[in-house]
Image (cartoon, rainbow, N blue to C red):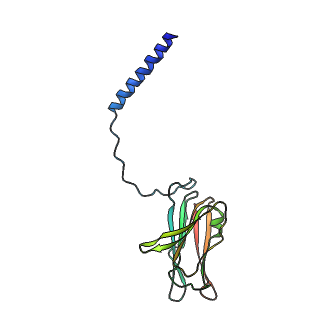
Amino acid sequence: MKRTSGVVASALLSLAISGAASAQQAPAPAAPAAPAARPPQVSGQVGSGAPEDIFLVLSMTETKGVSMSKTEFRLAQGGYYRFNLVCPGSGPVNEASIEFHADGLLENSHLRLVSVSERSTGGPQGTNEINFHVQGEQIRFMECEGLPLNVRFSFYPIRKGTYPFTINNKTVQPAVETKGSFIVE
């Protein structure tokens, strides 16, 4: 028994010495690289870290129409996104509103967080916000009613497809509808 213990102890000591010797010969680790731009989201892989911000900025035209900054968003299935609906700074008053509908996308996504925030002077990102932590709930639409706020929701699209969205401008009669689409690849 003592002989077996001696052989095992010798083998372990040899491994420890050879490991220390090879560690001394290993090159020093490289300095950490500067943070790179966020890599593109990959379809079929669940996104991690902070969500990727995407923006739809709405503004009122002189004829009370609504213009959109984009009409198409390309997303990766399973990617993690924060959709920012930037309401017009002026236009809707009282019960007149501008509605954002994206039923198909909302029904085929895992929603994480919904928030309402005020705009900062530096751009569309809010400085103060109210967060609604969502688990298994459904949102039907979002509505801008006269306040220059942002409405945001974080989500993972879970099914591939093309999902239309509409902007209903109810500040004019009859209401005017504008369309766009989310393409989940």
Q: Where is residue 12 in the image (x, y as percent from the top left)?
A: 44, 21
Please identify the quarter of the rendering in which residue 123 is found: bottom left
Q: Position of residue 122 (x, y in %)?
A: 41, 72
Q: Where is residue 163 in the image (x, y as percent from the top left)?
A: 62, 68
54 horizontally vs 32: left or right? right
Query: Where, quadrant-wise, is the C terminus in this rendering?
Result: bottom right
Q: Is residue 107 above or below residue 172?
A: above
Count of marks placed on residues? 0
Q: Is residue 9 above or below residue 154?
A: above
At x 34%, y 46%, the residue is: 31
At x 54%, y 87%, the residue is: 64
Q: In this view, does 165 lie above or below 42?
A: below
Residue toward you, 39 or 145: 145
Residue toward you, 160 or 3: 3
Residue toward you, 156 or 162: 156
Residue toward you, 140 or 157: 140
14 horizontally vs 167: left or right? left
Q: Position of residue 167 (x, y in %)?
A: 59, 77
Q: Is residue 3 above or below residue 18?
A: above
At x 36%, y 48%, the residue is: 32
19 horizontally vs 66: left or right? left
Please identify the quarter of the rendering in which residue 103 is found: bottom right
